[in-house]
Image: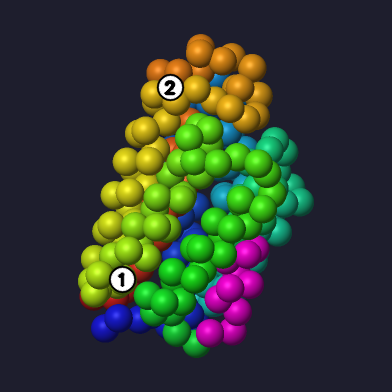
Amino acid sequence: MQEINNKGAGGIISGVAAVIVDNKAYLSEIDGKIGDGDHGVNMAKGFGRAADRLDPEGTLTEALQVLSDVLMSEIGGSMGPLYGMMFSDMADSLGEAETIDAAKFGAMIRAGLEGVQDIGSAKVGDKTLLDAFTPAVDAFDASIAAGNTFPEALVAMKAAAETGRDSTIDMVAKVGRSSRLGERSRGVLDAGATSCAMILGAFAEDITARLS
């Protein structure tokens, strides 16, 4: 099987939320080294609230929109609105599709990426979530274009996100509050790239399980 039903896939977001909540302390620890130290707290609060409100048996589209609404309206900091717009664009891309295959999933994550890119001026190499997100989306598309299966493309996406996350250790922050540190921002993982890799990894694992 190379597709999943949109109906009933709302539980994917419950799984994503669980990963973020479980890593609240870790994400805040990373953020605290070069930022405000509240990334994990804010993310866990937003994802946790969304998980409490969504219907796991509803559609992924609906769950993405619930998560977006919570992040954009109830969470402070810069990452709430950023992730909120990302998930809103993903929901818009999926729309009322009955099933989600590789093409629809690829379009969904591409829409989310473009939404993030449209909000600010950050680019790959600036030590942001884009350093995990961009290569992950590109890897998924490249894998499908090469004739690989949906699960194989998800593996490629997850691996690229993690490699991109790890690449931020050697980067100097160019945008956001951490950019004020200059060279002192080198040597630490970017919290946004780390949470993004977690989110994409959770997507990959849950969808793969549903495809088998």
Rendered image: mark on residue 61: none
Q: In the displayed structure, would residue 102 be above or below residue 64?
A: below
Amino acid on which disc 1 is placed: Ile
Q: In the image, what residue occupies the spot 43% across and 44% down?
A: 132
Q: In this orientation, does residue 78 appear?
A: yes
Label 1 vs label 2, nearer the camera: 1
Q: Is residue 74 magenta?
A: no
Q: In the image, what residue occupies the spot 58% across and 27% down?
A: 174
Residue 192 x/y as whole percent = 52, 38
Q: Quadrant of residue 120?
A: top right
Q: Quadrant of the C terminus?
A: bottom left
In this orientation, which residue lies closer to the viewer: 36 or 146? 146
Amino acid on which disc 2 is placed: Val
Density class for disc 1 (Cα within 10 Å; few <14, some 14-19, many ≥20) is some
Q: In this orientation, does residue 21 appear?
A: no
Residue 4 x/y as whole percent = 38, 80
Residue 5 x/y as whole percent = 43, 83
Q: Which residue is mark 1?
A: 144
Rendered image: mark on residue 188: 2
Q: In the image, what residue occupies the spot 37% across and 65% down?
A: 141
Q: Quadrant of residue 41?
A: top right
Q: Main secondary structure of the magenta part?
A: helix
Residue that protrudes farthest toward the bottom in the picture: 98
Q: In the displayed structure, would residue 82 be above or below residue 144?
A: above
